[in-house]
C-alpha cells in the first residue's frame, strides 16, 4: 500500500515538474524552434515577391484615390501573424512561436512567419480541407467507393510539396484507379448515384463542380434552360454572349466515357455518346463535347477527359488562374476580390489587383506558395479594422480596411486549443495531444455548425453557438485541465505582469494595453499565489469569449 502511495506521489511530482518545464520554456524563451529552410533574409530582401506586392499596393492606392476613399493605417506584426495563421493554418500562433517570431528583425518577421507556416503540416492540412469543400463537398458521399479523408490527405501532400496547381488539377481530372490507392479519383466517385444501376459518375454534377471549383463560374443554372437574365457570359473573348443549355451539357459531355468498375475509375474502351433531352426537344439527342468559351485553346485530344483538363489548365485560360487567385485571397481575407467567388464574369470588369496577382501566378508556374507569400506581403494584410471614419460597403469592397470576418468553427476550435497550450500543437506534438485536439475539435465543429460548401456566405452567430462558447465542454475542459497552461500559470509564473502578458499573447496574440494590464494585475493580486488559479482561468475565459478572439480583424 505504501509502495502504491509512493508511486502516485512520484507520478504527481513528474506531472508538476513537467508542467514547470513546459511553462519555463514558454516564459523564458528557451524553446528551440528551427528556422524555416525556405527563408533567408537576404533572399527576401531582393526577392521579386516584394516587387509584386508593391505593385498590388500601388493598385489599391490608385483605386482609393480615384474613388476618394479614406483607408486604414497599419497594424503591428503580431496581429498580421495572427491573421495569416488563421487564414492558412486555421489556428493562432502559440506562445513559443510568438517568442521565436519576436527574435527576428521587424522587417523579416512576416516573411519568416509565412515561410514557417508553409513548411508546417497545419497549413497544408487546413488549405487542403478548404479546397476539398469546393471539389467534393462536405458530405460522406457514396458508401464504400468514396474516401473523402483520403482525398484531403492526398491534397495536403500536394500542397505541402508545392506541386504546381495546374498539374494538381490535371491529375484530379484525368486520374484512373481505385478510390483507396488513387485518392484523386474521389473527385469522380463522389458524384456516383448508387442504386441507379449504371454506377457511373454523374456528368452533370461533374460539369457543375468543374465550372465552379476550377473556373470560378456558376454555369450549372444552365442545366435546365438557357440564360434568360444575361447573368452568364460565355463565348469568345471578343464575342461574349449569354449562356445556353447546350453550353452546359456540351461541357458535361466530356465526362461521358468515365465509368466505375472493379478496377476503379477509368475511361471505357468504346466511346459512349452523351445524350440529353433539351428543354424544347421532344426526345433526347447526342450532345457533342465542346468547351463553353475560349474555344481556340481546345486541343481536341482524343481522350475526352485529357482534352478538357488541358483546356481548363491552359496558361492562357485566364478564368482558371483567376479563380484560384480569388479563392486563396478569400481564404486569407474571409472574402474574395470578386464575390461570390464562383461568379466571376468572363468578360470582367476585374479588379486591377486580381489581374496583377493572376499574371504573377501564371508567370511563375501556378505556384501556390509564392501566391500566398505575395498576398501575405501586401499592405492589404496590414491594414487596420478599427478606424476613425465610418466604414461603408465601398470601403470593404475596395479593401480600404481589413475586413471584420467572423471566425469559422474550425478556426474557433483551433484557436481555443492553441490558446491553452504554450507550445505549438502541430504534427510534431505528442500523439496524445494531437488525438485530444482532434476529438475535441471535431465535436466542437459538429455542435457549433459547419458552414458547408457555401462557406464564404456571411452568417450571423446563433444562440446555440454563443452558449457553446460560454458553457461548452471544449472551452471548460481546456481551461480546467491541470496539464494545460491556465491551471499552472498563476503559481509558476515569475510575477503577475508576466502572467497577464502570457494570457493575452496566447489568446489574442498581443500584449495588453496599460489599462488592461492594470485591471488584470489588480484582479489577480487580490488573491494569494496559491489561490490565483480560478482568477487566471476566469481571465482566460473572458478573453476567449470576447469579440476580439472570435473575429478575424
Image (cartoon, helix red, strand yellow):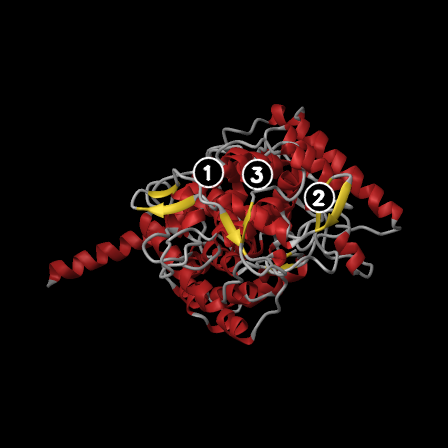
Distance of mark 1 from mark 3, alpha carbons?
32 Å
Task: Give the mark nearest the N terminus, 1 or 3.
Answer: 3
Say which of 23 and 458 sits in front.
458
Q: Residue furthest front?
A: 282
186 up-or-down from 229: above or below? above
Residue depth check, mark 2 versus mark 3: number of the one nearer the observer: 2
Q: Which residue is mark 3?
A: 114
350 up-or-down from 226: above or below? above
Residue depth check, mark 1 versus mark 3: number of the one nearer the observer: 1
Task: Give the mark nearest the N terminus, 2 or 3.
Answer: 3
Tell me residue 247's x, y (percent).
63, 49
Task: Give the mark nearest the N terminus, 2 or 1.
Answer: 1
Distance of mark 2 from mark 3, alpha carbons?
40 Å
Residue 407 can be seen, yes or no: yes
Residue at the image position 59 percent from the left and 36 percent from the top:
311
Q: For mark 2, does the 10 Å Cα neighbourhood hold few (<14), some (14 to 19), or many (20 or more) residues? A: some
Dot 2: element: strand
Q: For mark 3, does the 10 Å Cα neighbourhood hold few (<14), some (14 to 19), or many (20 or more) residues? A: many
**Screen quadrant of the N terminus:** bottom left
Tell me residue 273's x, y (percent).
48, 45
Tell me residue 260's x, y (percent).
36, 47
Say which of 79 and 254 sits in front.
254
Dot 3: element: helix
Residue at the image position 87 percent from the left and 50 percent from the top:
67
User: Seen in the image, is 233 located left or right of residue 175?
Assistant: right
**Screen quadrant of the C terminus:** bottom right
Distance of mark 2 from mark 1, alpha carbons?
25 Å
Residue depth check, mark 2 versus mark 1: number of the one nearer the observer: 2
Q: Which residue is mark 2?
A: 235
Q: Which mark is residue 174?
A: 1
Q: Which mark is residue 29?
A: none
156 up-or-down from 248: above or below? above
Amino acid at each position: 500500500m505504501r509502495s502504491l502511495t509512493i508511486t502516485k506521489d512520484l507520478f504527481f511530482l513528474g506531472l508538476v515538474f513537467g508542467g514547470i518545464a513546459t511553462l519555463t520554456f514558454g516564459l523564458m524563451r528557451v524553446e528551440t524552434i528551427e528556422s524555416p529552410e525556405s527563408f533567408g533574409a537576404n533572399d527576401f530582401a531582393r526577392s521579386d515577391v516584394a516587387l509584386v506586392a508593391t505593385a498590388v499596393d500601388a493598385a489599391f492606392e490608385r483605386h482609393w484615390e480615384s474613388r476618394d476613399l479614406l483607408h486604414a493605417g497599419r497594424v503591428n506584426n503580431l496581429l498580421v501573424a495572427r491573421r495569416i495563421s488563421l487564414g492558412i493554418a486555421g489556428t493562432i500562433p502559440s506562445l513559443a512561436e510568438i517568442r521565436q517570431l519576436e527574435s527576428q528583425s521587424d522587417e523579416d518577421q512576416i516573411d519568416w512567419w509565412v515561410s514557417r507556416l508553409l513548411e508546417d503540416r497545419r497549413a497544408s492540412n487546413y488549405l487542403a480541407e478548404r479546397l476539398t469543400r469546393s471539389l467534393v463537398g462536405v458530405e460522406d458521399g457514396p458508401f464504400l467507393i468514396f474516401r473523402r479523408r483520403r482525398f484531403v490527405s492526398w491534397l495536403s501532400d500536394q500542397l505541402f510539396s508545392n506541386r504546381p496547381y495546374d498539374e494538381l488539377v490535371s491529375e484530379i481530372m484525368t486520374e484512373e484507379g481505385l478510390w483507396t490507392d488513387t485518392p484523386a479519383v474521389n473527385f469522380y466517385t463522389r458524384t456516383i448515384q448508387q442504386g441507379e444501376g449504371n454506377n457511373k459518375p454523374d456528368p452533370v454534377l461533374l460539369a457543375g463542380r468543374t465550372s465552379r471549383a476550377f473556373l470560378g463560374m456558376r454555369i450549372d443554372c444552365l442545366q435546365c434552360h438557357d440564360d434568360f437574365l444575361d447573368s452568364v457570359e460565355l463565348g469568345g473573348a471578343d464575342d461574349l454572349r449569354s449562356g445556353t443549355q447546350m453550353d452546359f451539357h456540351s461541357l458535361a459531355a466530356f465526362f461521358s466515357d468515365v465509368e466505375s468498375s472493379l478496377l476503379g475509375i477509368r475511361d471505357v474502351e468504346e466511346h459512349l455518346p452523351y445524350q440529353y433531352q433539351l428543354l424544347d426537344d421532344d426526345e433526347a439527342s447526342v450532345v457533342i463535347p465542346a468547351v463553353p468559351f475560349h474555344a481556340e485553346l481546345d486541343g481536341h485530344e482524343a481522350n475526352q477527359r485529357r482534352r478538357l483538363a488541358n483546356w481548363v489548365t491552359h496558361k492562357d485560360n485566364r478564368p482558371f488562374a483567376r479563380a484560384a487567385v480569388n479563392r486563396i485571397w478569400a481564404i486569407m481575407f474571409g472574402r474574395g476580390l470578386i464575390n461570390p467567388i464562383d461568379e466571376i464574369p468572363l468578360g470582367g470588369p476585374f479588379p486591377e489587383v486580381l489581374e496583377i496577382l493572376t499574371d504573377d501566378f501564371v508567370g511563375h508556374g501556378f505556384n501556390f506558395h509564392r501566391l500566398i507569400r505575395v498576398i501575405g506581403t501586401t499592405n492589404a494584410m496590414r491594414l487596420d479594422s478599427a478606424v476613425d471614419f465610418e466604414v461603408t460597403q465601398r470601403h470593404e469592397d475596395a479593401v480600404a480596411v481589413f475586413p471584420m470576418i467572423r471566425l469559422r468553427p474550425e478556426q474557433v476550435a483551433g484557436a481555443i486549443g492553441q490558446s491553452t497550450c504554450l507550445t505549438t500543437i502541430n504534427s510534431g506534438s505528442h500523439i496524445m495531444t494531437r488525438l485530444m485536439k482532434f476529438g475535441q475539435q471535431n465535436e466542437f465543429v459538429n455542435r457549433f455548425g459547419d458552414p458547408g460548401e457555401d462557406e464564404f456566405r456571411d452568417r450571423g452567430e446563433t444562440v446555440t453557438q454563443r452558449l457553446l462558447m460560454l458553457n461548452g465542454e471544449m472551452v471548460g475542459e481546456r481551461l480546467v485541465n491541470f496539464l494545460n497552461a491556465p491551471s499552472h500559470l498563476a503559481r509558476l509564473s515569475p510575477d503577475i505582469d508576466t502572467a497577464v502578458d502570457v494570457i493575452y499573447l496566447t489568446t489574442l496574440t498581443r500584449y495588453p494595453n496599460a489599462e488592461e494590464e492594470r485591471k488584470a494585475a489588480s484582479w489577480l493580486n487580490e488573491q494569494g499565489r496559491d489561490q490565483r488559479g480560478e482568477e487566471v482561468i476566469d481571465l482566460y475565459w473572458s478573453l476567449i469569449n470576447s469579440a476580439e478572439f472570435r473575429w478575424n480583424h
